Image (cartoon, rainbow, N blue to C red):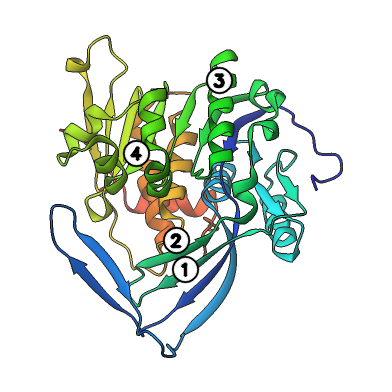
Amino acid sequence: MPKKGESLNRADFFVVGSSTLDIIAKTSDVERIDIGGRHVERLVCISFASKSELESLELSPGGSASNSAIMMRTLGSSVCLLSAVGNDEFGKAVLADLRKNRINTAAVKVFSNSPTGVGLGIISPGGEKSILVYRGANSALGRSDVPESAIKNSKRILITSLVSAKNYGLFKKVLALAKKHRRPVVFAPSITMLHSWMPQLRKLRPHFDVVIMNYEEGRYYTGKDNIRDILGSLPGKIAVVTKDVEGAYAADKSGKSSKNAKYFHVSAVPVKIKDTTGAGDAFSGAFAHTYYPAHSITDALKTAAAAAALKLTHKGAHFSLGKAHLASFMKSNASKLVVRRF
């Protein structure tokens, strides 16, 4: 249940999406196999009908919406979260973690008939991950769970991964209310969301202020392979695509003509990877926080690239190193965090 005294008061961001309790399993008893073709499939293989040894096992709150919300709160934005948990021990742990991180949970739904979502992350020695997801209570979120007052009282909306049929009703209502109250929308979907909703999304043709995807998602959404073509074909005034070790790319298409679009690139900062979980969410949260209200793509790309890099250096889905640590990291890596036009 929402914490006593919490209300849907004014916030910089209203964040919509999943909250989970992540189980992080690290093992050397896996193999990676890449299957070639037009689109390379990268598979994690574990021996069937046998026991595989784990080097470590940790419980950590996660979920795309929670991860991005905490990143934004760390940087100073006030955040109200719309998500869901079950009325169980995992749900209590997730809510306690959100409140510890100063996230307004007044809009978080607690379902007694649906357990808290769980993400089982298998981490390789190189830090790469494969995640098995049980969405649980997150799938139960629907139109009736959207509080209009929260959207009205928030400056901006960030929508992360939603998947179920009920979620789609919620998604449409959030977009309609954002339009009604003239609130800009940042859209940061998962590949699973795109797989589930692509036909509907194409018909809906929503108007996003900012769209953030990784290369796999952007290529799937647009059917393009070239990064410039992907950026140009994505919806949104500002399109952003992350591409692992290459860094991140952005296009400013807010001008009157698409021919006048401006394209930007920031390199990734090399770090020793411990866990890739939540790095994309940290990037999305940091970009959204920094882009508004100054609308500086350069500053947003620098901060987001640094946040994602730092997230890779520690375990767990949340960015937990603090604003001062991020500022120090950015200062020491200023020569690498250079945004160039392309």
Nearer to us of marks 4 and 2 is 2
Residue 95 - label: none
| SS class, disc 1 | strand
Q: Which residue is mark 4?
A: 301
Answer yes or no: do the residues labelled 2 and 1 have beta carbons within 8 Å? yes
Q: Which residue is mark 2?
A: 277
Identify the mark nearer the N-term, 4 or 2.
2
Q: CA distance from mark 4 to mark 2?
A: 20 Å
Q: Position of residue 110 (x, y in %)?
A: 75, 49
Residue type at mark 4? Leu
Q: Relative to 214, is 53 above or below?
A: below
Answer yes or no: do the residues labelled 1 and 4 have beta carbons within 8 Å? no
Q: CA distance from mark 3 to mark 2?
A: 31 Å
Residue type at mark 3? Ala
Residue type at mark 2? Thr
Q: Given the current orientation, which residue lies at the most extreme top position?
A: 256
Q: Relative to 152, is 40 above or below?
A: below
Nearer to us of marks 3 and 1 is 3
Residue 176 - label: 3
| Quadrant in the rendering for residue 166 | top right
